[in-house]
Image: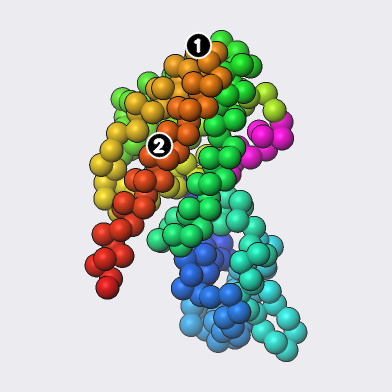
Amino acid sequence: MGGKVQRIPGKIAQEVGAEIVSGRLKPGALLADEITASGRRRVSRSAYREAIHILAAKGLVQSRPKLGTRVSPLADWHLLDPDVLAWMFSGEPQQGLLVNLFELRKMIEPEVAALAAERRSLKQLNEMGQALEVMARETLHSQEGRDADEAFHAKLIEACGNPFLASLSATVTTTVIWSTIFKYRMEGLKRDSMPEHLKVHEAIAARDSAGARAAMVELIDLALGDITQAMGPRRKRRK
């Protein structure tokens, strides 16, 4: 999830977007005007204006002539946009949004796993297995391990054979990788998630739809528990 040189407008959009999705900038909040904001950041007005256009395209802000730029209501946010998801996890996510996001995963991924158990090809099964081998060897503490985790979930979605579900691949894999990075940043990934991933793979290999569904539910529930546990100590320290 890195390696690219980020342009100035993208960097500004990331910084402001993270403030919005974390709740530090509330819906309705008025952003500084273009001249003031660009001056504070020591960037050109055109660069700041482009950043605002990026945020507006993702539903996070609304600009009105003579009224300025305000943070949009939550209902307008493009929450499944990969950038918005990445910004959410760049700081500390709002707990309500986090729970909602995992509810969505729980609605989608268990059924994806069940379909994959019925429809996967041998090639897809082997590619999932190869991703898990890398994940086990490199661990989620490394970029290679996290890339393998992302590849496993992406291949699982491909194996379900439904193009509408496949269109959600970027959302699911972005959530997986950024939630892993967040857990590592907070408390160093105390629990090994390999057993749950292996259960999913074994059920898919056995063409056991019910088993794949149940294993994925367990994987998601434990992942949410890990994140809420990681957030707990930090919240206590702030009080």
The residue type indicated by label 1 comes to Ala
Say which quarter of the image contains residue 37: bottom right
Q: Is the magenta stretch mostly helix, strand or loop?
A: helix
Q: Position of residue 180 (x, y in %)?
A: 39, 44
Q: Mark 1 points at which residue?
A: 206
Quick check: can you spot residue 5? no
Q: Is residue 54 left or right of residue 65?
A: left
Q: Distance between the residues labelled 2 and 1?
A: 26 Å
Residue 146: assigned label: 2
**Residue type, label 2:** Arg
| Residue 169 position in % (x across, y down) | 60, 37
Q: What residue is shown at x 44% (from left), y 59% (from top)? A: 95
- Which is more toward the observer, 156 or 102? 102
Q: Earlier in the sequence, mark 2 or mark 1?
A: 2
Relative side of 94 to 71, left or right: left
Q: In this view, does 163 lie above or below 74?
A: above
Residue range of the region highlighted in magenta in the rendering: 163-171
* Most foreground residue, 47 or 155: 155
Query: Is 222 a magenta residue?
Result: no
Q: Are marks 2 and 1 in contact (CB under 8 Å)?
A: no
User: What residue lies at 34% left-to-right and 45% top-to-bottom?
Assistant: 226
